[in-house]
Amino acid sequence: IAVDGEGDIFTTNSTGRICKFSPDGELLAEFGGDGESAGKFRSPQGIVVESDGHLLVADENNHRIQLLSSTGQSVNAYGYLGSGQNQFRGLRDVAVIGDRVFVADTYNNRLVSIAFVEHVRTHTHTHTHT
């Protein structure tokens, strides 16, 4: 669960969707869906709303972080399956502290710290599953 500057609440769900609710609990928008393409998710987990309204989502079974606009449009994706640099296995959560993104990389048993502007916003590191 994440809350933006307007008080709107964002959640992830098991159908691969991101839901946006008003502070009163009214469903305002849904985006995403199950899949591997940009803006789609396979078990989205942790979610963060940046100060500019962009969303970062830990896309667990696509093994990547997705950066979305506040309206759910795909901006970028970072990561792919593996255990090396730029690789993840089962992302569970994501947090932003200063200019760093921290990712709980569950099955690699590690916490990964990424330079946000340098990597997540500007570089795409993804591979399609086979």
Image: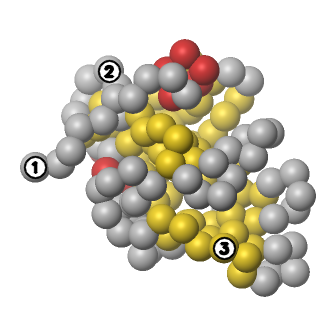
Q: Is residue 54 above or below residue 83?
A: below
For residue 110, say whether it is visible: no
- Of tags 1 and 3, the one toward the viewer is 3
Q: Residue at x 74, y 24 (%)?
A: 98
Q: Earlier in the sequence, mark 2 or mark 1?
A: 2
Q: Which residue is mark 1?
A: 130
Camera-nearest residue between 106 and 41: 41
Amino acid under label 1? Thr
Q: Which residue is mark 2?
A: 85
Amino acid under label 3? Ala
For residue 13, say whether it is visible: yes
* SS for callout 2: loop
Disc 2 and disc 1 in contact, CB within 8 angstroms: no
Q: Is residue 49 left or right of residue 73?
A: right
Q: Residue at x 67, y 44 (%)?
A: 54
Residue 40 image point, x, y percent:
40, 59
- Of tags 2 and 3, the one toward the viewer is 3
Q: CA distance from mark 2 to mark 3?
A: 34 Å
Name the image quarter holding the N terminus. Answer: bottom right
Residue 26 image point, x, y percent:
78, 83
- Of tags 2 and 1, the one toward the viewer is 1
Would you identify the image quadrant in which residue 61 lies?
bottom left
Q: Residue at x 10, y 49 (%)?
A: 130
